[in-house]
């Protein structure tokens, strides 16, 4: 899965189904002792038989939906009560589901207790400050007004919501507050229904079941539609006023740290691998590697289709329909970005108008195409960041489709082994063509492969899907690791992920791998403060700018995207500049320099790269033998 920008930060999905029975695919341990959970794969899987399209749930009455939600919460509780879980991100997910169900079923006392538990589980400063921004006022207003609707409830909510917002410290919370405002501005019920028609309905109608992940999405979006959206006209004025009164942008620390190389510095050309969704190489005419003997593939590198077959190209080909839609997607992406940044622009207005005008049946195909085009833009955006300010940079393309759960056929061990051979070819290509640094802004885990199986396989048993996924994941992980090991003189730089979770616990590859020539990167904002989405863990050793980073997309438009996908190539950018200045650097020495030049934040959570300081360290450490 591409660790990509959060073009639409809301995962809008909802599902309704006529449920006759619900079957647990895995039961929590019956003994008093809890079962120790060491990774996400140790958790049980649950399955829910369905009949009818899940998207119909948005029209269900409360009694029908809540009966389903209570059974999902029963399974959620069985995990909380039966498993020893130390991972806070997992606990946050489990208690968030519990909270949503409690609010939906009007268990206000239970919801307040769960809110306090969740509050204690927040780790990032911004998350701690903004946690429960909407939920606390909703529940407190219910208790005060003895109602969940009507004038008294709305008045009580407004007073409490405004007080909570006004008490926030702007410097700490501005990104979250702006995103909250943007979400309310463009969210519609039809948009959510349409998204579910595309993302959940097809698999459910094929298998007759949904898994726990789909059930969680269902509950979350039911909460948004029935609890949050009705308060839109109360929430937006409060957020708009707060932003207007405090809208002083955070200082940008990155411009002062930037290093720009020039040709008169006698640089050594540096081959930079962009292992991603492809690159519009026409945008980088002076920064492209050319293979003197390309054979059957592109002179700029290697490209593989979804089946793992090599073809001649730098960027995935578009259908006529996708080509026609692309300008609209670009405009919508820019508009949503502006909304999330509280920028009142023509693009933002057009995005709101476009989304508001869509029926669910129009949203479904649009979301499918938007998902493809979003990942299609990804590699080019990454390449622009990685090569910025470096005339010695030479892009080497390694293209494949990593949105695994969107591949239309079911995964098999044979498919994984085909890509294992492909990845070995990529590693050897990097080695033989002296590729010094490679960016990998993507990651995969067992859960993603399970999701892929859920969408494409007739297998209804989630425990069986988990076993199949584990086999495929084992091959996939080995393939990625082997590719890196086969190019020991190449530095690989990967994104930590955007799920606000521990990459080691979720077993994301490559982010969870420990290799001497690999470094994993987390994302911070323009002020060097931790983003809400960045993942973390013991492999994440440095952090870089991953918030609203501007770069090219195919065709030449420049646009700002956020994600650890943008942080990782900023470290690639620094590594390539170090190697251009001193070609004798090994991956280990380059990593050591980057870590040595980084600055630890006061709370000890972040290690912010400092290109200027790191280049200065290199100049101090260079010996006569390493100078040219």
Image: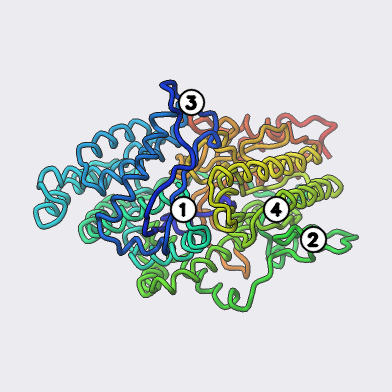
Q: Is residue 142 left or right of residue 477?
A: left
**Residue 76: which quarter of the image?**
top left
Which residue is more in the foreground, 215 or 120? Answer: 215
Query: Which disc, if any, is residue 310?
Result: 2
Query: Which disc, if any, is residue 210?
Result: 1
Q: Disc 3 designates what residue? A: 35
Say which element carries label 2. loop
Which residue is more in the foreground, 81 or 94? Answer: 81
Q: Can you give x and y, in whole percent of width and height, for residue 77 in the image?
A: 36, 35
Cα–Cα gap, marks 3 and 2: 45 Å
Q: Disc 4 designates what residue? A: 274
Question: Which image quarter holds the C terminus?
Answer: top right
- From the viewer's perspective, is residue 559 above or below residue 393? below
Q: Is residue 201 left or right of residue 435?
A: left
Say which element carries label 3. strand
- Of mark 4 and mark 1, the one earlier in the sequence is 1
Res. 266 in view: no
- From the viewer's perspective, is residue 305 above or below residue 97? below
Cα–Cα gap, marks 2 and 4: 16 Å
């Amino acid at each position: 899965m591409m660790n990509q920008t959060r073009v639409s930060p809301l995962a809008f999905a909802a599902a309704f189904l006529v449920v006759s029975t619900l079957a647990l695919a895995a039961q929590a341990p019956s003994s008093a002792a809890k079962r120790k959970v060491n990774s996400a794969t140790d958790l049980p899987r649950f399955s829910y038989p369905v009949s009818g399209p899940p998207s119909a749930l948005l029209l269900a009455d409360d009694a029908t939906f809540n009966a389903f939600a209570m059974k999902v919460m029963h399974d959620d509780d069985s995990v909380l009560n039966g498993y020893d879980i130390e991972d806070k991100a997992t606990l946050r997910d489990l208690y968030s589901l519990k909270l949503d169900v409690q609010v939906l079923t009007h268990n206000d006392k239970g919801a307040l207790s769960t809110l306090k538990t969740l509050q204690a589980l927040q780790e990032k400063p911004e998350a701690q400050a903004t946690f429960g921004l909407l939920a606390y006022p909703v529940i407190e207003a219910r208790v005060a007004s003895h109602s969940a609707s009507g004038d008294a409830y709305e008045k009580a909510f407004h007073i409490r919501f405004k007080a909570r917002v006004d008490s926030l410290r702007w410097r700490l919370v501005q990104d979250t507050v702006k995103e909250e405002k943007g979400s309310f501005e463009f969210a519609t019920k039809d948009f959510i229904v349409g998204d579910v028609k595309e993302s959940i309905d097809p698999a459910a109608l094929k298998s007759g079941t949904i898994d726990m992940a789909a059930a969680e999405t269902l509950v979350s979006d039911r909460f948004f539609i029935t609890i949050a959206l009705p308060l839109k006209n109360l929430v937006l004025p409060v957020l708009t006023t707060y932003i207007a009164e405090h809208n002083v942008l955070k200082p940008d620390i990155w411009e002062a740290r930037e290093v720009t190389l020039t040709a008169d510095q006698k640089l050594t050309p540096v081959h930079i691998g962009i292992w991603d969704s492809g690159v519009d190489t026409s945008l980088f005419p002076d920064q492209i590697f050319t293979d003197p003997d390309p054979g059957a593939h592109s002179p700029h590198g290697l490209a593989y289709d979804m089946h793992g077959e090599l073809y001649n190209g730098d960027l995935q080909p578009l259908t006529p329909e996708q080509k026609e839609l692309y300008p609209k997607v670009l405009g919508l992406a820019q508009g949503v970005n502006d909304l999330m940044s509280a920028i009142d622009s023509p693009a933002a207005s057009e995005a709101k108008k476009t989304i508001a005008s869509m029926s669910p049946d129009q949203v479904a195909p649009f979301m499918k195409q938007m998902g493809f085009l979003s990942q299609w833009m990804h590699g080019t955006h990454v390449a622009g960041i990685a090569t910025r300010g470096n005339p010695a940079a030479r892009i080497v393309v390694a293209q494949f489709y990593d949105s695994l759960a969107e591949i239309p056929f079911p995964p098999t061990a044979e498919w994984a082994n085909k890509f294992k051979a492909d990845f070995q070819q990529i590693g050897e290509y990097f080695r033989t063509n002296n590729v010094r640094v490679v960016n990998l802004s993507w990651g995969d885990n067992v859960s993603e492969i399970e999701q892929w199986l859920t969408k494409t396989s007739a297998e209804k048993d989630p425990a069986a899907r988990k076993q199949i996924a584990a086999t495929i994941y084992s091959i996939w992980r080995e393939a990625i690791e082997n590719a890196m090991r086969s190019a020991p003189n190449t530095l690989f730089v990967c994104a930590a992920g955007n799920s606000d979770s521990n990459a080691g616990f979720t077993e994301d590859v490559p982010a969870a791998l420990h290799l001497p020539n690999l470094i994993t990167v987390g994302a911070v904002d323009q002020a060097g403060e931790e983003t809400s989405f960045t993942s973390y863990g013991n492999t994440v050793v440095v952090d870089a700018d991953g918030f609203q980073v501007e770069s090219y997309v195919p065709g030449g438009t420049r646009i700002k995207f956020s994600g650890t996908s943008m942080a990782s190539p900023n470290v690639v950018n620094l590594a390539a500049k170090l190697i251009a200045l001193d070609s004798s650097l090994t991956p280990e020495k380059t990593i050591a320099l980057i870590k040595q030049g980084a600055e630890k934040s006061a709370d000890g959570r972040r290690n912010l790269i400092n290109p200027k300081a790191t280049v200065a360290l290199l100049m101090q450490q260079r010996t006569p033998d390493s100078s040219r």
